[in-house]
Image (cartoon, rainbow, N blue to C red):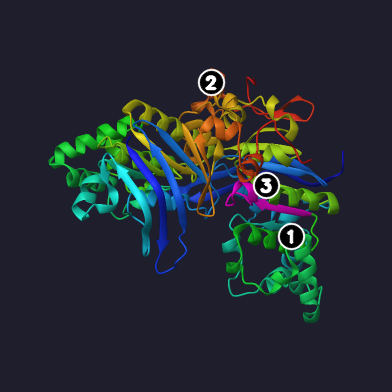
Amino acid sequence: MLLDVKNLAVSYGKNPTPTIEGVSFDLNDGEILAIVGESGSGKTTVIRAILNVLPGGGHVSNGSMTFDGKNLLELDAGGWRALRGKNISMIFQDSGNMMNPVHTIGKQFVEYIQVHSDLDKRAAWDMAIEKLELMNLPNPENILNSYTFELSGGMRQRVGIAMAITFQPKLLLADEPTSALDVTTQAQIVGELMFITRGSGAAMIIVTHNIGVASYLADNLMVMSGGRVVEYGKTDDVINRPQSEYTKTLLASVPEIGGRRYV
Amino acid sequence: MSEIILSVEHVTKKFPVSGGRFLTACDDITFNVRKGETVAVVGESGCGKTTLLKAIMNMQKPTSGKIIFHGEDITQLTGEAKRQNYRHIQMVFQDPTAAFNPKMKVRDIVCEPLINFDLIGKGEVDSKARELLTQVDLPADFVDRYPNNMSGGQRQRVAIARALALEPEIIACDEATSALDVSVQDTIIKLLVKLQREKGITYIFICHDMALVSLFSHRVAVMYLGNMMEKLDGDKLNQARHPYTRALLKAVFSTDQEKNQYIGILPGDIPSPLNIPSGCPFQNRCEYCQELCQQKKPDFSEVAPNHFVACHFPL
């Protein structure tokens, strides 16, 4: 088992009521888990807790998390540095925002590679190009010399994914990776995520509010509401045989082409 | 079929850019909006749908073309006549947080248009605000709230209440539900449909989600790079014949695993609107592209009753 999360609870500051509570799931190599839910349901908090990057005084107040045999709650700063970006990496909603707009993409990509390896600049640059090519980006050299604002949303997201998969991490955490994109670009990126995880054997946790994307990608599906897990199981079971009322309502509100019409 | 309430005739909007060039955001757009119907304008970012809406809202004057409303070309209106025209066409924005002044209470927000047009006195604000909130299924005592004390869905209801205040004939919605969760989105759409039945309001709904559009639109217009590609009835989306419309439909992920097998990926990106290829604007991403498509821009022609396609080889 790659990741084992048991009874996870996260609290913010001195607030005694945890923001999320009783979250348990496990993930094997190459498996994809999708966490769906509405805004404020705590789905992003779960993956931020796994990477220990909770904002503003957030901390794990209960439960356990084991990744690849290591207890994540006992790691020190050095341990995290070795893990993050190399064994576990994250894809954000808008990868443009995670990068510095006043430096070229190449400078940041090379810096990232050098932090996690002992390659020299030239080798790191070549590695970056190789990864960008993997994401079907034309003219990778050109992209490395560009600034984030010079690329389209879809290209920025591809750069973000290329960076995330550089060191062939065992676990990818994707936080709404396609929500800011157009439908056709979304389909491209989802296809590429599928290709990459299936090809490299990486496991992935994808947080999304698009239930269609979740059911397309994921092996397992977790539905969250109000910081609690409402339903968790095989995607097929959750989608086709939902048990909780909440999941049923959520699924019923997803619009389908050729489905119900109000006029 | 009901009467035509608004007609957009050959609207073109060009923005000057550096080097003496022009960016064509809308290229010869023509369509009619019928009373009490919902027209959805669908397309990806940069396809010119918001520019078109701004022209209809009279916020931007088109470079050429007419927008006829009540027998009058509203793009030519100026001064007080232009201001009075706003009474009949109101708008709901994508981000309800940004659309309100955070220091105003809901009461003042929803009644501001009425005060602007001297339709009610200061003393009537409270009762009118309560009435408007009830129409959008919000508790009447929300009048004392500030926008940041409400959820996204509630804020969007307040935005709809404000748009309703002047009893407009047309409400234009610019991605009005894109920022909302699916279940909230569903309730807002139901509300819009209910208001349409009660008051006969006409909606022009800008959206990029084909599945959402299929829920409630009478007519769907698909735009790409400033051009209208296809126009058809909302309940006949499955009969779409333009390759781009088909691609949009195929890009929608469904909760039905069987439908997900048919997900099709449209390769490439939208070309820059600064150098639109001559011929069909969709040629470089179209799998059916032929020589003719690169040479001649297809006409917008009727392939079936009420079904228009701009394609040399409709599917």
Query: Label 3 to label 2, Cα distance in Å?
Result: 38 Å
The answer to which quarter of the image holds residue A167 is top left
Give the mark, 3 or 1, whose residue is nearer the N terminus.
1
Rendered location of residue B30, percent (x, y)? 71, 40
Q: Is residue A210 magenta?
A: no
Rendered location of residue A194, percent (x, y)? 42, 30
**Start-end of magenta stretch:** B170-184
Give the mark, 3 or 2, whose residue is nearer the N terminus.
3
Mark carried by residue B289: 2
- Tell me which amino acid carries mark 2: Cys
Question: Which of labels 2 and 1 is toward the front?
Answer: 2
Residue to which mark 3 is pinned: B186
Left or right: where B241 falls relative to A3: right
Tag 3, which secondary structure? helix
Mark carried by residue B77: 1
- Tell me which amino acid carries mark 1: Leu
Mark carried by residue B196: none
| Residue in the image at 63% along x and 25% along y | B311
Rendered location of residue A204, percent (x, y)? 38, 37
